[in-house]
Amino acid sequence: MDPFPLPVTAWAAALLGFLHVGLTMQVVFARRTGKVALGTGGNREIEMKIRAQGNAAEQIPLGLILLALAELLTASWTVVLQAVLLVSGRYIHGTLFNRINRPALVRPFGMVPTLAAHLMGSITIIVTLVGGG
């Protein structure tokens, strides 16, 4: 058995793991600076950092599951594109969302590639299963 049966997924998971730790640390530091032990303390900056980290926690697991299943079912270049979309979308969303005063303006730049990765994975899985391999 190949020691890395899912190399694309493994790389994406590692990069997304670093991103998530970074987003989590931003929350920790913002809470520490604002002397807020739980929640936001009414601080908008802390709220934005919590949502950037929370959105990553919500989107990354499904993205990695779809990526892993697509990678298991096909060796297509589309799996690499799916991984690039997922990682770049999460990075863009996580870094821009809590740094821009009007997050609604930048949210699509992170969500569109993320959702495109989700769709690519879903379509790859369905097409492969229906097509019989």
Image (cartoon, helix red, strand yellow):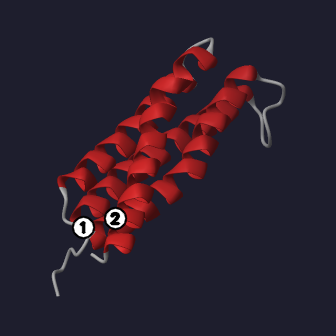
Total marks drawn? 2
Amino acid type at image mark 2: Ala
Which residue matches tag 1?
A: 74
Amino acid type at image mark 1: Thr
Residue 3, located in which quarter of the rendered image? bottom left
Q: Which percent across, then down, holds residue 53?
A: 59, 41
Rendered-image quadrant of the C terminus: bottom left
Q: Nearer the viewer, residue 13 or 118?
A: 118
Residue at the extreme front: 131
Residue at x 84%, y 25% (from the top left corner) = 42
State the separation of the CA atoms marked 2 and 1.
6 Å
Residue at x 34%, y 64% (from the top left corner) = 70
Q: Which percent across, then down, holds residue 33?
A: 66, 28
The answer to whether the residues at label 2 and label 1 have Cβ atoms under 8 Å apart is: yes
The image's mark for residue 119 is none
Which residue matches tag 2?
A: 70
Q: Is residue 93 visible?
A: yes
Q: Which percent across, then down, holds residue 16?
A: 40, 49
